[in-house]
Image (tube, rainbow, N blue to C red):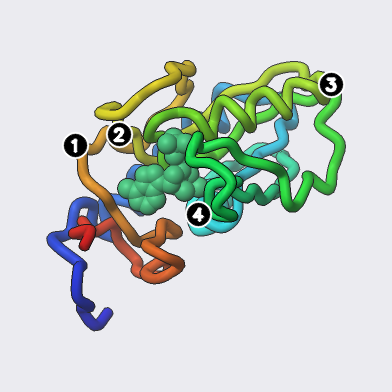
Amino acid sequence: MEKSNGIGRTIISKERLRKRVIDLGRDISEDYKGLHPVVLSVLRGGMYFLCDLTRAISIPIHVDTLSIGRYSEEGQNSSGAVKITKDLDISITGKHVLIAEDIVDTGLTLAYITKILKNHDPKSLHVCALLNNTAHRLINLPLKYVGFDIPDMFVVGYGLDYKEDYRHIEYIAEYKLP
Ligand code: IMP
Ligand code: MG
């Protein structure tokens, strides 16, 4: 991948990502044996993680996605409040649900999604976060699985963007915010 302005050092290489995601898939396959969970992710940040994680899971699962939009992006406020812009397509009522999140930062997004999903009465609801940056955590929700704890920095790649750029980089890189 051609380096662009702002892209800093590699934080998690393609190979480390691959190995860790396979481990997570193995753990999930053991823990959810016989439970036929729904593994879902938030577009677009979670899409690469969801694709790789679910392919590393060896038990029967259902896969779904949702999309959210931030009110702050429309200039209404900067509270981090989000709204659903694409709902789930399959029912999660009575199902074991695992959210595959790209990154948990303040925890606000996850708190919002968790609240909405709980309204659908899933049998269980847990989180698998690829990246965990605790430096700005405002809401502490339990993370059943964490891929990597990262130091306080802005990162891009493997689904994560800066203004929609860099999602398709195959590794996690530091991004120096302008
Ligand atoms: P939170 O609501 O503060 O936990 O933020 C979660 C969301 O913010 C993630 O799902 C990402 O979309 C975005 N985000 C947080 N930190 C980063 C980062 O370092 N790089 C890219 N996106 C980030
Ligand atoms: Mg996201």
Residue 177 position (above or below residue 111): below
Depth check, front residue: 144 or 83: 83
Q: Are marks 1 and 2 in contact (CB under 8 Å)?
A: yes
The mark that comes first in sequence, 3 or 2, is 3
- Quarter of the image for residue 38 reads top right
**Amino acid type, mark 3:** Gly
Q: Are marks 3 and 1 in contact (CB under 8 Å)?
A: no
User: Tag on residue 45?
Assistant: 4
Say which residue label 1 marks.
Answer: 151
For the residue labelled by badge 3, is the local secondary structure a helix, a strand or a loop?
loop
Task: Please name the residue shown 54% across and 41% down the image.
Answer: 77
Say which residue label 3 marks.
Answer: 94
**Some atom of ligand 2 lies within 8 Å of the CB belonging to the residue at label 4:** yes
User: Tag on residue 133?
Assistant: 2
**Some atom of ligand 2 lies within 8 Å of the CB belonging to the residue at label 3:** no
Give the CA separation, mark 1 to mark 2: 6 Å
The mark that comes first in sequence, 3 or 4, is 4
The mark that comes first in sequence, 1 or 2, is 2
The mark that comes first in sequence, 4 or 1, is 4
Give the CA separation, mark 3 to mark 4: 27 Å
